[in-house]
Amino acid sequence: MRKKKLIISGVISLLIIIPLIFIKITVYPAPELPEIQIQNPQRETINSTTFRYKNNWLRKNKSGNWESYVEGTAYERGIALGLLHKELIQSQETAFVGEIEKLLPSRILRTVMQLGLGWFNRNLNKDIPEEYLQEIYGVSQSFSDEYSYVGPKFNRVLNYHAAHDIGHMVQNMNLVACTAVSQWDFESGESEMVLGRNFDFYFGDEFAKDKIVLFVNPSEGYDFVSVTWGGFSGVVSGMNEKGLTVTLNALPSEIPTKSSTPVSIIARDVIQYASTIEEAYAIISKYDVFVSESFTIASALDQTTAVIEKTPEKTAIHYPEGNQLIVANHFQSDEYKNSPLNLDHIRDSESMPRHDRMRELTADDTAISVENTLRYIRDQKGSNGKELGIGNPMAINQLLAHHAVIFEPAKGIAYISAAPFQENVFNAYDVRAIKAMENLDPIHSPEIDSLRLGQDPFYTSREFSNYEKYKILKENFKKDPTKSVSEKGFIEKWIATNPEYYEPYLLLADYYFGQKDFELAKTYYEQARSKAIPYLGISTHISENLAKIK
């Protein structure tokens, strides 16, 4: 009895002490702020989707994207971003926290995750330059008190900036899998340089709904455009006034032991302060990272594109032969391409199939154009045009992109997708005209209407409608598989919405295997195995369970 009481007492003590440790670990001090503080700033509401604060503004365009312009010093930009994007920030955090709760339904597990991340990110504020800390701190003032149980506002914002990196640590969540292609020709006729990319960072449909096309006129550095979301000061896809672009692609990583600078902050530093690949390399090299990442840099001044591969150990650069660079999620530099980690990743993942499919598509064309690049990043087929099923990670277009972009660095034009994914229109903007946007009436869009790219025909097709139904039926199955399969016609209806995709067969097979209905499990495993499977781990799982059934 005494032993039992001691155990209970110890557990209670831990429950009290651990949150205190968590708070002590993760409460970051405010950065040093300018002497002139901004007192009680207020935004002007022009209409329900248009707001202004000083010269800064936010508006929603007809395609559904938010467009925003901010200027000034770091802290001034942060205050402006927070005021203008307040509702977007709060809805984005709700979507983010909701997705975490979906992935980790257990409150205990979420608490453990908080403690782990709190310890892991305990020095995160020391790894971010003061300029961006000031901006993030300004933004954080507009975050909601609703999620104070997660942590103080400034803490939460800093930790959210590491979300892209944390996604690497949980590879089986499949949060990050992007594809990019750049082509250029400065020697024959009109100079052409086009880069297209899908940012396949998926954290639920709600998270991708309210994209912000952000135009930044900083007091120091270059003007730039970035595709972002509420409360995020990092960059994942952007281009500056000098015609330098940066896009991020995840690379295979070992499990880290502590955080360093989030890669989105490094990309932000590049887009604000680099005009050439050499300058970008120098900026990237000075940082430490805790996951491996590739920075694809297209440069109008250099008239070429390179991929800078950054690991916790060193920085490497890869220039392609010829006038084309394709980037997926594996290393290409001489320093890393033959490493065991990279070779294992190529064998086990869908990265190389996407890379090879892009090479096939570009090999069929002689013209470098925005229209061809748009076709590439919307492609859903496998090598040699093989049907993969809709939403397969082996496809360049997996129908889960937070956004897609096409950049013309030599012309200074950025094309940004409107939701959903890359299926809707792409709005076009002149990045060299950002300074003039301070005088723009925010009721009017800075978009260049004549350059807008049209919707993908697939977007209005029966196949797209079926895929929307497929996702709903999949969620219903995952919530209550027994109820779903007992519903008359459910299985046939579900499979009919996406018959070439391996996933419904696999989920059904695993369900029946768990129910010890081995005959049905065998049938569905064999059907799954006949489809295109993106991961070696899934193929191995199917083979092992079929062997057990035998």
Image (cartoon, grey):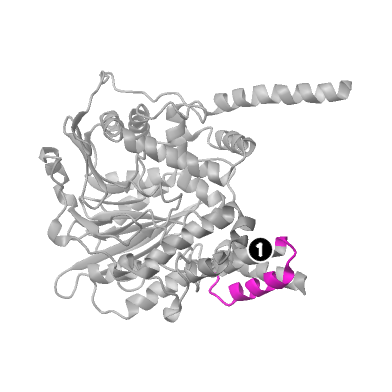
Q: Position of residue 479 (x, y in %)?
A: 58, 51
Whether residue 207 is visible to the viewer of this picture, yes or no, is yes
Q: Quadrant of residue 262?
A: top left
Q: Which residue is mark 1?
A: 510
Asked where in the image residue 507 lies, by quadrant, the reply is bottom right
Q: Is residue 534 above or below residue 294?
A: below
The picture places residue 220, in percent across and down from the top left corner, at: 23, 37
Other-residue count near label 1 (Cα within 10 Å), few / some / many at <14 / 14–19 / ≥20: many
Going 68% across and 64% down the picture, which residue do you hit? 512
The location of residue 25, given as percent across then percent down, is: 56, 27
At horizontal 39% and vertical 40% (from top left) the residue drawn is 92
Give the percent coordinates (x, y) of residue 19.
61, 25
116 in relation to 528, above or below: above
Which residue corresponds to the image point at 64% horizontal and 26% vertical from the top-left? 18
Q: Which residue corresponds to the image point at 71% horizontal and 21% vertical from the top-left?
A: 13
Q: Is residue 353 left or right of residue 22?
A: left
Residue extending farthest to the right is 1
Task: Reply yes or no: does residue 240 show up in magenta.
Answer: no
What amino acid is at disc 1? Asp
222 horizontally vs 279: left or right: left
- From this view, report whether residue 376 is shown above or below residue 295: below
For the N terminus, give its image quadrant.
top right
Left or right: 522, with 472 as reference point? right
Extent of the magenta region: 514-533
Confirm whether residue 161 shows in the render: no
Give 242 or 40, whichever is nearer the viewer: 40
Q: Where, quadrant-wise, is the C terminus in this rendering?
A: bottom right
Q: Quadrant of residue 360?
A: bottom left
Magenta includes 528?
yes
